[in-house]
Amino acid sequence: MKIVRDWLVTLVSLVGLLLGVLLLLSPIPVGLVVITISLAALLCVNQRSRHLLQAARSRWHKINRTVHKVEKLLERRFRRLWTVISSTRPHNDDHSG
């Protein structure tokens, strides 16, 4: 049952990403909110997306710094999402820049 739920969340997240990209064209920045929520849901259920985020954080230090700032904001409010995102830290993690 968990597998079916994870596949449904992944499918809805991917549709949300596409919708968010389309909504970026609107005058109200709703697309950014939709993309953020879709990515958060995708990270929570999809191991491949966590691996891709970890690879991006290892390769690009600016992305790593930005995600680290988001981690600090999420730590108290969204514990599960914080746990998932912090698990994508690169192995050679340094926040100095």
Image (spheres, rainbow, N blue to C red):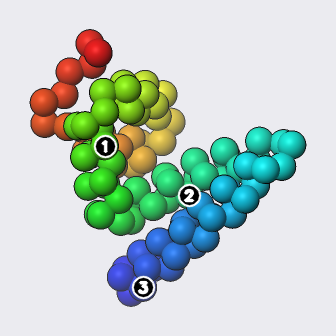
How far across and how far down the image is residue 42, in percent?
45, 61
Residue drawn at 50 percent across, 36 percent down: 77
Quadrant of residue 45 within the rendered picture = bottom left
Q: CA distance from mark 3 to mark 2?
A: 18 Å
For mark 3, what is the residue? 4
Q: Residues within 10 Å of mark 2 (few under 14, many from 20)?
A: many
Using the image as rendered, state which of residue 92 and residue 69 is in the foreground: 92
Q: Is residue 85 visible?
A: yes
Q: Nearer the viewer, mark 3 or mark 2?
A: 2
For mark 1, what is the residue? 56
Q: CA distance from mark 1 to mark 2?
A: 18 Å
Quadrant of residue 91 within the rendered picture = top left
Using the image as rendered, state which of residue 83 and residue 22 is in the foreground: 22
Q: Residue 38 got which mark?
A: 2
Considering the numbered disc 3 on the image, is that residue within a helix, a strand or a loop? helix
| 1 or 3: tag closer to the N-terminus | 3
Q: CA distance from mark 1 to mark 3?
A: 28 Å
Considering the numbered disc 1 on the image, is that residue within a helix, a strand or a loop? helix
Which amino acid type corresponds to the residue marked 1 in the rendered image? Ala
Q: Nearer the viewer, mark 1 or mark 3?
A: 1
Q: Is residue 41 left or right of residue 3?
A: right
Confirm or deny contact between disc 1 and disc 2 (CB under 8 A). Answer: no
How far across and how far down the image is residue 68, in percent?
37, 28
Q: Residues within 10 Å of mark 1 (few under 14, many from 20)?
A: some
How far across and how far down the image is residue 82, in percent?
39, 41
Using the image as rendered, state which of residue 14 and residue 42 is in the foreground: 14
| 1 or 2: tag closer to the N-terminus | 2
| 3 or 2: tag closer to the N-terminus | 3
